[in-house]
Image: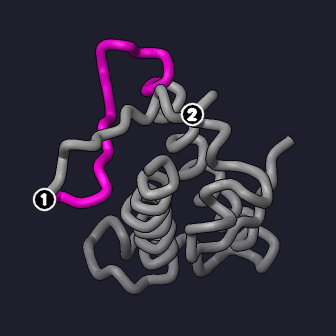
Amino acid sequence: MLNLFGKVLMEYVRDITIHQMDSMVEGKIKTADSKEVNKLYETFTTEQKEWVAQLIERTTDTALHYLLFMLDQCENIDVLVSETAEDKSQQINMREASDGLCGELYSDEGWIQKYSNERYLYEGE
């Protein structure tokens, strides 16, 4: 169930966040603030646009990392996952299922590589 949690986190948080931010800078979102962002973005060089793409990805992944770190550290907050919404009899606590939730994001077997449909340009330091 740990991987189910990771899959849902990648699909509903990482992928949607990166897609939304990409859409904003590319001018696909028509709100006033998005138009301002796109107007500035269009003045950037190719190298600067690549940097923006990395920044979007790194910011998203850093936020996910620290969310998972918080879930590991704050013992008064539990994330319980069951295989189906109908059967909650076999709920698993994500903190107890992992030896470090934020570490589940990375590596060739990590959630980003296995479940995210968005780019993964930055592979850590």
Label 1 environment density (alpha carbons within 10 Å; few <14, some 14–19, many ≥20): few
Q: Position of residue 114 (x, y in %)?
A: 64, 67
Which residue is under mark 1?
86
Residue type of the residue flagged with mark 2: Ser
Residue 62, placed above or below residue 75: below
In the image, what residue occupies the spot 40% across and 15% down? Answer: 74
Residue 84 occupies quadrant: bottom left
Q: Residue furthest front?
A: 89
In the image, what residue occupies the spot 74% across and 63% down? Answer: 51
- Could you tell me how far apart the alpha carbons at marks 1 and 2 are, in whole angstroms? 24 Å
Residue type of the residue flagged with mark 1: Glu
The magenta stretch is 70-85
Residue 113 occupies quadrant: bottom right
Indicate whether residue 28 is drawn in magenta: no
Q: Nearer the viewer, residue 24 or 84?
A: 84
On screen, residue 100 versus residue 109, left or right, reads left
